[in-house]
Amino acid sequence: MRGAATDADDALRAAGEAALLAGHPDLRLQLQLNRINTRERTGIDDQESRWLHRLAARALMQRTDPSELATNTALVRLLAAALGGEEPDRIREAARLVGLGHDEDSARVAALIDALSEWDASLDVPGTLAMRAQLPLDGDDPAAIRQAWTTLAGLGTDAGYVLDQLWGQEPPPPRVLESLRAIYLWWGKDTGQPTTTGDAATQIHFLSEFPIDWSRPEMRSLDDLLLTAYPTMSDCLLLASRVGVNPAGLSSTRSVQATTRELLEAASRRGLLDVLVDTVLADPHAGSIHKPLRALLGDAWLSRHDSRVVVLAGGEAPGVPFVADSREEGTGYDPSFVGPHIAAPVGVDAADAVLVDGSPTVDYTHFSLELSKSRRLSRWVAWNIDGAALREVGDRDVPGESVEFAIDPPHRTRSTDWQTTSTPAAPWSAVASRDPATCHGVSTAKPSPPTAIPTL
């Protein structure tokens, strides 16, 4: 082993001294830093040689373009590993630029999570750091704090945003710094998944765990699959609205991966992870991930849910309806709620309708809709609201929190020809709350019970 390490060190030294690299101090610097890190990893380093090799690296840094030192992610990472023990700002720069990398070392990320949660739990107000980083925190005990920090696992380069925010609050303690430096020192050399406790055969299904355990590879794989099928911010927000999570409660100013994580967290809190997966499996536009997603879910989960997700053979072929996932039975929209009968425009375009249990109409509690296959939006929605029973909704994940319903004056009637009505393509909540003119219905003298049916 020591002989192989010495051979590697000699090869790196010879490459750095090659005449071909005489005019390329940046490349010679990378080789020198790799040499420093290789010697540390293989244990052939000592205090005197370490000092000499780092002195040589700093001499090459003086001859390297400063912009290269600041923006070349390979150099930044190598500098953090080689010099971060003496210069913590090197580690911060690496965390900001490369985060935890695209291919994480799961065991070393777990060690970082342990260090961060220990630091957070030791503060005067435990969990302060997790709250400042806007991580999902469900208590101030050490277990809850560690669970919050497991969100870092699988974030890859996006973890840099959280880590940089953390650094802006106060400098991390030595254990956190060394855990981060170890990630950069052993970059690309995964030591394997962290060990888990319990019998794998009896381990709870990853979709059933609450809160989400991001250290589990299955959960990170689900995150990656969703990013593959829904790669844009609009895709992610549309999926949220279809699942029943209010898109307004998700951040759209960060990366798509961060927003996808927020969606999974929100769905987990509301018990909608199964519904989310059902929806994805029933979405023909996500067909590229159906096979790996089913393999990830396992036969046991699929046997319990396949009765609710039925995709007809050739479901994307012209003229063959796509059958979506079933929803719990609800009373649905009542066309006679305010007195005059106002029917919903069911089956206006039957060929484009998404069938749910054989019907184009999806009924919820006092609410119904019809989905369009081609537009991937609701074609129409209809609901009944008792104005006397309106109340504030406190949960940001409950659809409708941002909807400001306007109660129609008594005895005023509006009617619209469904066939000629045209409104911008938008989720129903946006149409209902931001464009009252597109809401059509009748209100009576009873205590403000409006009926509204916006169309798309």
Image (tube, rainbow, N blue to C red):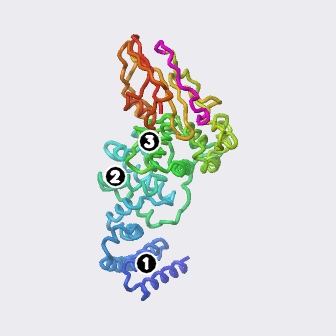
Q: Is residue 262 left or right of residue 216?
A: left
Residue ID for mark 3: 144
Say which residue appears at 39% left-offset and 18% top-offset: 387
Residue 277 circle label: none
Q: Residue furthest front?
A: 420
Q: CA distance from mark 3 to mark 1?
A: 43 Å
Hey, what amino acid is under mark 2? Leu
Residue 309 x/y as whole percent: 64, 37
Residue at position x 44%, y 35% from top? 246
Q: Eyeballing the image, is 338 above or below 60?
A: above
Q: Are the residues at dot 2 and dot 1 in contact (C-beta closer than 8 Å)?
A: no
Q: Is residue 71 magenta?
A: no
Of labels 3 and 1, earlier in sequence is 1
Q: Amino acid at mark 1?
A: Leu
| Of residues 18 and 47, the one drawn nearer to the viewer in this rendering | 18
Expressed as whole percent of the image width and height from the top left, the position of residue 3 reads 54, 80
| First in residue order: circle 2 vs circle 3 | 3
Task: Report the side of 220 relative to 53 (left or right).
Answer: right
Closer to the N terminus: mark 2 or mark 1?
Answer: 1
Task: Choose between 2 and 97: the one closer to the eye.
Answer: 97
Question: Magenta region: which residues?
Answer: 337-354
- Amino acid found under the numbered disc labelled 3: Ala
Q: Can residue 121 be seen from the camera position used here? A: no
**Residue under circle 2?**
166
* Residue 82 locus on image (x, y percent): 39, 71
Q: Which residue is mark 1?
A: 31
Q: Secondary structure at mark 2?
A: helix
Q: Is residue 406 visible?
A: yes
How far is mark 2 from mark 1, CA to CA? Answer: 31 Å
Q: Does the magenta-highlighted stretch encompass residue 346?
A: yes
Q: Of helix, strand and loop, which one carries label 3?
A: helix
